[in-house]
Amino acid sequence: MQKTQERVAKPYAATEAVTATDAAPGRGWPRYWPLLLLAAAVLPGTALFAVGRWEDTPAFQTWRTVCLAITVQATPFLLLGTAVSGAINAFVPARVFQRLLPKRPALAVPAAGIAGVVLPGCECASVPVANSLIGRGVTPAAAFAFLLSAPAINPVVLTTTAIAFPNSPAMVLARLVASLLTAAVMGWLWLWLGREEWLRPAARHAGHQPGHSRWTEFRHAFQHDFLHAGGFLVLGAMAAATFNVTVPRSVLDVFSGSPWLGVLFLAALAILLAVCSEADAFLAASLTGFSPIARLAFMVVGPMVDLKLIALQAGTFGRAFAVRFSTATTGVAMLCSALIGGMLL
């Protein structure tokens, strides 16, 4: 009996020894620990040295100025948008939107586009508001029409456009009509071609929950939207600043001679520069070498598609949506700019 117990105990002891042997490497140093230690000691110092040397160059100073300018310029309107989004989520019942917008989605799209005039903010503010509207039961097509029109036709933008083009009231009207037309067409395109699998709204409760404080819900929604969108805003600002530094201004002169190339180039420039819609009219007015239609395209495309807005849309609705929606919006905005500009300018 004792021998049997010893024979049974030996396999268990062997098993424990093997287990301890196998587990030992996991508790020890990694195999290439000298290289990892060397990298940890050298790479941070090298990076800091390179950044310190580059920081003294005019290119880095310009990059830093442009990046901070875009971020500081857009942050107040992002705060406004996230505050409005949180207020809609906590205080506005869903039945309000059902009463204000037509029941037929095809009619709700232009109505939502016209409603964009009530939000005096830039494109950063419209993204969280559109997300909140979708969460409250508004059809995505109408929410997207609002997203596109709000930064382009609000009173602040139209006023700055009139100031930037004091002798051309037709430019203000052309911007209003072309932006509204673009927003409506994109809303109808979503009704026709849009798919639910392209859209990934931020997952959070929409609307007031019974038994919860509305102010607490407002604060939580505001914090979530602002922190979520703020990071993508900074990424977009960094990308726009990089373009400003790397592309020489002499490239502008190459495309200014052709009207159609001018439209394409200024549309691409508006996307890359990511200028806030409250300030883009002054930049467009300074591009005197380009045709009025090209400058109109700059002001119509910019508030609807730019690097920081694409980043915000990707973070809020998903990359699949951002790629498709921004590409289609760019094409529609250029066509509407050419059509309306040809008739009014």
Image (spheres, helix red, strand yellow):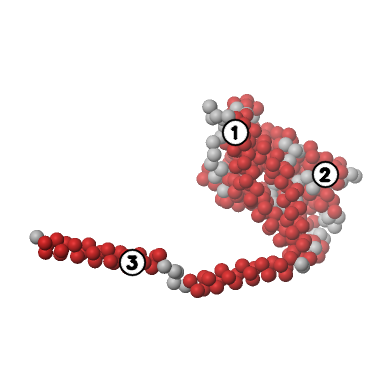
Q: On residue 250, which mark appears?
A: none
Q: Position of residue 25 (x, y in %)?
A: 38, 68
Q: Nearer the viewer, mark 1 or mark 2?
A: 1
Q: Amino acid at mark 1?
A: Thr
Residue drawn where x is 52% and y is 45% of the image: 197
Q: Amino acid at mark 2?
A: Thr
Task: Answer with left or right where residue 67 lies relative to residue 222.
Answer: right
Q: Amino acid at mark 3?
A: Asp
Question: Residue 212 or 234: which is nearer the viewer?
Answer: 212
Q: Eyeballing the image, is 35 above or below 291? A: below
* Residue highlighted by disc 2: 161
Q: On residue 22, which mark appears?
A: 3
Question: Residue 5 or 61: which is nearer the viewer?
Answer: 5
Q: Position of residue 278 (x, y in %)?
A: 78, 45
Task: Answer with left or right where residue 305 lies relative to residue 341.
Answer: left
The disc, 1 or 3, on the residue closer to the chain's N-terminal end is 3
Specify whether residue 226 is in view. yes
Residue drawn where x is 15% and y is 63% of the image: 6
Q: Position of residue 256 (x, y in %)?
A: 81, 59
Q: Secondary structure at mark 3?
A: helix
The disc, 1 or 2, on the residue closer to the chain's N-terminal end is 2
Task: Answer with left or right where residue 174 lies relative to residue 317.
Answer: right
The disc, 2 or 3, on the residue closer to the chain's N-terminal end is 3
Task: Answer with left or right where residue 263 lies relative to residue 328.
Answer: right
* Residue highlighted by disc 1: 216
- Between the C-alphas of marks 1 and 3, the distance is 52 Å
Q: Eyeballing the image, is 261 above or below 105? A: below
Q: Nearer the viewer, mark 2 or mark 3?
A: 3
- Between the C-alphas of marks 1 and 2, the distance is 39 Å
